[in-house]
Image: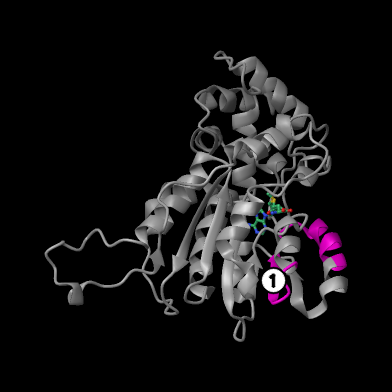
Amino acid sequence: MDAAITSKMQKHYPVLLKEIISIISPQYGGTFIDCTFGQGGYTKKILEFDKTKVIALDRDPKSEKVALMLQKKFEDRFRFKNIKFSHLNNLKLKNEDVRGVIFDLGYSYTQIKDPSKGLSFDSVGKLNMQLGLNSFSAEAAINKLDQKELEKIFKYFGDEKEGKYIAQNILKERIKKIIDTQDLVKIIDNTKRRKNFRIHNSTKSFQALRIFVNKEISELIFGLINAAKILKKDGVLAVVTFHSLEDKIVKYFLKSLSENKSISRYTPLTEQTDTLFHLTKKKPITPNEEELSENPPSRSAKLRFAIKKTDFFDFETHIEDQFKNLIDIEKFGDKL
Ligand SMILES: C[S@@+](CC[C@H](N)C(=O)[O-])C[C@H]1O[C@@H](n2cnc3c(N)ncnc32)[C@H](O)[C@@H]1O
């Protein structure tokens, strides 16, 4: 989401809500896993259908407040866990008919407005950017990683063309003092030669740092793998992304498990191995004009989904190899 525009809004809008509901069909009942509960926008809508049950997750412990209210109202139809969605496979689901697993990636309006999280470049004080259940903060990353590592984070997670010079200047400044949020904004402002008047100078670098601090690439990859395992036959995997890196990962995952490119079209049908997913739409769904005018930050949202064709879950995916260079960059955080 674009922080600058989000901060002018007054509440969190569940993005592409109508489209999500129409794809997962809660009117037929079943258990739905809301992997990114946030303020409960999707969960509340699903629970309006009385044969449903929702298991909601969020890494931010502050989500628990909304969850407690839903718990009181819906009792055994709702359960909340403060865990990261990469650990989806640890849920006890033996008796659950999992009809849908939903991800609405990134952060909520409530989180960007929370000064203690330091996600916005208007924040003052210590660099943070931890969404919850993290092992290090943006302050540790900016003040301890070496120049090459910082450069790679800005380049690969933010597509920041001037990442090399930003990293150079961070190293010069941090000899004098510990860099806080406003110091970093100033360093980026003073470094950037190519001004882009459509976005804030810090947008790309802040996105890069947030992805790094929250290990968003490995979270997404392992979240998708585990979601594919727990879904039942005919269940839907639906993912809303907000930037091209996330969308690339989701697109690769769904596409690679929905077709079998290695099979020659001359191979007899009986010898073709079946695929895990049915992909009804190759192109992502994006917000309509009405949603865009009501909620401008939704303009970067893309929804992709696929339907699981079998209960069998022992599938092979090359997604970890495909995005190994990005996972390796996240590993710079292991020493912090
Ligand atoms: C865009 S908000 C979701 C908003 C929600 N759909 C709603 O309608 O209120 C994303 C949420 O996902 C959570 N989140 C991000 N990464 C996560 C992860 N790896 N595991 C669990 N929760 C995560 C964030 O803390 C945030 O609350």
Q: Residue furthest left?
A: 266
Q: Which residue is mark 1?
A: 55
Q: Position of residue 2 (x, y in %)?
A: 66, 34
Kindly identify the amino acid type of the residue bearing the numbered disc 1: Ile
Residue sitting at x 72%, y 59%: 37
Ligand 1 image-quadrant field: bottom right
Asked if residue 18 lies in the magenta stretch, the reply is: no
Circle 1 packing at 10 Å, graded few (<14), some (14-19), many (20+), is: many
Compare residues 279 and 18 and report the one nearer the observer: 18
Residue sitting at x 77%, y 39%: 118
Toward which corner of the image does residue 70 lie, by quadrant?
Answer: bottom right
Q: Quick check: 296 above or below 192? A: below
Q: Quick check: 115 above or below 185? A: below
Residue sitting at x 42%, y 53%: 281
Q: Quick check: 115 above or below 327? A: above
Color theme of the render: one colour
Looking at the rendered image, the quarter that the N terminus falls into is top right
Q: Position of residue 199 (x, y in %)?
A: 63, 23
Compare residues 246 and 17 and report the one nearer the observer: 17
Q: Is residue 201 visible?
A: yes
Toward which corner of the image does residue 40 lie, by quadrant?
Answer: bottom right
From the viewer's perspective, is 301 left or right of 56? left
Q: Residue furthest bottom?
A: 95
Q: Position of residue 298 (x, y in %)?
A: 64, 39
Q: Position of residue 261 (x, y in %)?
A: 25, 58
Q: Is residue 176 visible?
A: no
From the viewer's perspective, is 14 left or right of 191? right
Residue sitting at x 38%, y 56%: 255
* Stretch of the chain drawn in magenta: 48-69
Q: Quick check: 195 above or below 332? A: above
Of helix, strand and loop, which one carries label 1? strand
Compare residues 274 and 18 and report the one nearer the observer: 18
